[in-house]
Amino acid sequence: MIMEDLMSRRPPSSHWLRVRLLLLASLSLLIGVAGWTQIPEEIPVPMTVFTFEQNDEAEWNVVNDGVMGGRSEGFVTVEDGTLRFTGTLVTRGGGFTSVRARRVIDLSGQVGLELRVRGSGRQFEIEVGDGLRSFGRSVSRRAPFVASEEWSLVRVPFNMLRSTIFGQAVNAPPIDLARIESMGLYIADGQDGPFRLEVDFIRAYGVEDHRRAARQALGELDPPEGR
């Protein structure tokens, strides 16, 4: 005689209801002990990409628009835990300057990049390279952010990266986060004159960080303290 038959023949009572609930709880415990529960997928841990704590963390190289006949100039230094990208943009000719570094890292499962920055209030871009080539040329993956005069955190979701070749949009598959090879910082905002960008760190963030930031924006959580 099975348990359901026994239960159906007993008169309903609060005592018997408690017994039934206890039996169900015991059965659930046995299932868990037997290993029948479904283990959730692992949530990616936020990853630091650059801290700028040491000068030899990465070799940053300047690439100016002189390759296109332009006259913009960029300079980069890494000291006191901060990357400083400064120079002058000249829109006539090329109209851009950039700094780039090789960084091989697997960012699978991450949502985007978070940077702590300050600058001259101008728009910059971050570039993430996965080695993709099209028609024999490297495909650039870039997205904009603004560096205000005060230190602030900016987030760039990977799904906002735009694929281009020499500034022209191209159709390309989504970035391969498992094959990241390099990162760079650009300025090409169409404004002549001096610029300044300071970067305290660059790190990748995951889904849980994204949700936490959304709750902070809604006032449900206190903002994180700066480094």
Image: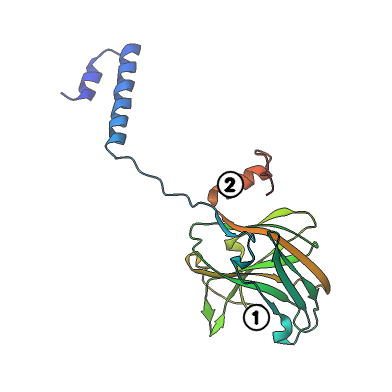
Is 220 left or right of 36, judged from the image as shown? right
Identify the residue at horizontal 29%, vertical 23% (top origin).
Answer: 23
Q: Is residue 28 above or below residue 119?
A: above
Residue 185 at x, y percent in the picture: 67, 69
Q: Is residue 36 above or below residue 3?
A: below
Q: Residue furthest right?
A: 193
Is 128 left or right of 76, judged from the image as shown? left
Is 5 left or right of 37, judged from the image as shown? left
Location of residue 128 (image quadrant): bottom right
Colour pattern of the rendering? rainbow
Judged from the image, the secondary structure of the residue bearing numbered disc 2 is helix
Name the residue carrying label 2: 211
Is 7 left or right of 224, judged from the image as shown? left
Classify mark 1: residues with Cα within 10 Å, few (<14), some (14-19) or many (20+): few
Location of residue 201 (image quadrant): bottom right
Q: Of the residues shown, which amino acid type is indicated by label 1? A: Phe
Identify the residue at horizontal 74%, vertical 73% (top origin).
Answer: 75
Front residue of 106 and 166: 106
Front residue of 71 and 25: 71
Numbered circle sitting on residue 166: 1
Numbered circle sitting on residue 214: none
Residue 200 at x, y percent in the picture: 68, 58
Q: Residue furthest left?
A: 1
